[in-house]
Image: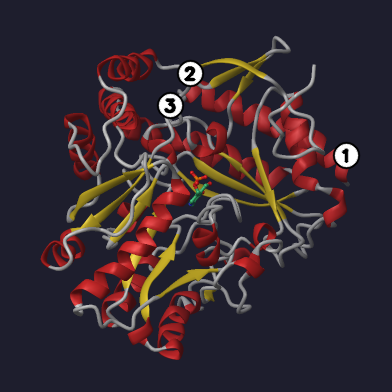
Amino acid sequence: MARHAFPRSFKTSYLEASHGEGIYIFGTDGKKYIDGCSGALISNIGHAAPEVAEAVAAQLRKLEFAHPSRWLCGVVEEAATLVADFAPKGLDNVWFVSGGSEAVESAVKLARQYFYERDGGKSSKSITIGRWNSYHGSTVGAMAVGGSMARRNVFSPIFLESPKIAATYCYRCPFGLEHPSCGLRCGHQLESEIRRIGAQYVTSFIAEPIVGSTVGALTPPDGYWPLVREICDKYDVLLIADEVMTGCGRTGRNFAVDHWGVVPDIIATAKGLAAGYVPTGAIIAKDDLLDAIRGGSGAFMHGHTYNGNPISAAAVVAVMKYMKEHQVVENVRAVEPVFAEGLRKIEAENPIVGQTRGKGFMWGVELVEDKKTKAPFEKKVAAANVATKECIEQGLIIYPGGGMIDGVEGDNFLFALPLVATKAQAREAVERLAAGLASAAKKLL
Ligand SMILES: Cc1ncc(COP(=O)(O)O)c(C=O)c1O
């Protein structure tokens, strides 16, 4: 049969999904797989929850669409209230979009418009500083602030580059330092970069609180987020937390910034927000930002046809209610030790596992050829793909990535179950991972 939907890669052989249930996806091959990466850290409440399907179907029957430039809609307001309540105190203004890239674009544009309105149309601030080894989406604006080297190479000539500082890659510190004696050099680099460019030109700094797909759950030292908050305040620069992956309970807090008690000016979120049931994202912003627009031109000069649509809103309401009723964030904290201990053991025993890291239900594994020297596998070996294939043999799906060392070398993957997994299911997933990585090590060494 001819296939007309072209695949993500012509060089990969794909499983075909039949249906899902909880943490499992069933293939048309008749096998049952643990969705060990929640799709791409999106299926937070697991697959095929009837509560969400019914809520979306009911909204479809009632009203499928009413354009936000002409209509307000009760279900959108209900969703926004739930999201604002879930967000850190002080972040009360919600703007819904269709996914993570749109959320990032919206955040970057809101930051620019805020200064434009606040300074009477005369602001010179326009630049967003990003970080290397970060991923903020696939659209041209999101790629410009992103620093996923492997994904940028082909497209960098078509976007307006944003300045970047280093990520908190302690395992391979770009300054050759060690925490804590480093004094958080990577965080202080933000201040040097702002001063170098001139604060009068910088609107914002964007970063993932825990880096997702680029480096595999890169978790910063505890002082990092408070430090970048302080620097942003000092230079009148907005702090944008890209919580597209880390948000909505994934790391054991509502949003990952909650681990450090930091309140950004804008959160960009998506994935877990509607948990894969409907394409959805959002930005959540502080009052000051909206006050400037309210008292200025009166409108955020930005919008997509689907922003604030009732179907996505119905899914958000249903997912938020599900999370509360099933105490999903509490479950993440209760089950986290199974992953933490299981991965520590794998790291100690498996010869190709250089480092495991993460929080809650967001774990990354970095693969190396030599644990002592941290030497990576050659790119042509495609170690993360080998590991993925061996895990699939064990009935476990993981999310491979690579190129984080220099844009070419480096292998990692994300291991991140739906947040509803029980301790027993988490144990089983860890066992399958250990077995998959043991056979990957045999193949690779
Ligand atoms: C941190 C982060 N930001 C933004 C995005 C882009 O989201 P989307 O694919 O929904 O556009 C992603 C997607 O993986 C992400 O992980």
Name the element at disc 2.
loop
Q: Nearer the viewer, mark 2 or mark 3?
A: 3
Tell me how far mark 2 sits from mark 3, CA to CA: 13 Å
Q: Are there few (<14), some (14-19), or many (20+) residues within 10 Å of tag 1?
A: few
Q: Residue at x 24, y 78 (%)?
A: 121
Q: Nearer the viewer, mark 1 or mark 2?
A: 2
Pair 3/1: label in front: 3
Looking at the picture, how far across and down is residue 299, in whole percent?
Answer: 21, 58
The structure residue drawn at horizontal position 47% and vertical position 38%, both measured from the top left corner, is 361
Element type where label 3 sits in the image? loop
In the rendering, at what x and y percent does residue 225 appear? 37, 65
Horizontal and vertical percent for residue 189? 47, 81
Q: Which residue is mark 2?
A: 22
Can you see residue 168? no
Residue in front for this viewpoint, 423 or 187: 187
Hey, which residue is sitting farthest top in the picture? 30
Q: For the residues marked 1 and 2, what is the alpha-carbon distance in whole angstroms?
A: 32 Å
Q: Is 137 positioned to the left or the right of 89 in the image?
A: right
| Residue drawn 44% across the image and 87% down it | 197
The quarter of the displayed image where residue 408 is located = bottom right
Q: Which residue is mark 3?
A: 277
Query: Which quadrant of the view contains residue 123?
Result: bottom left
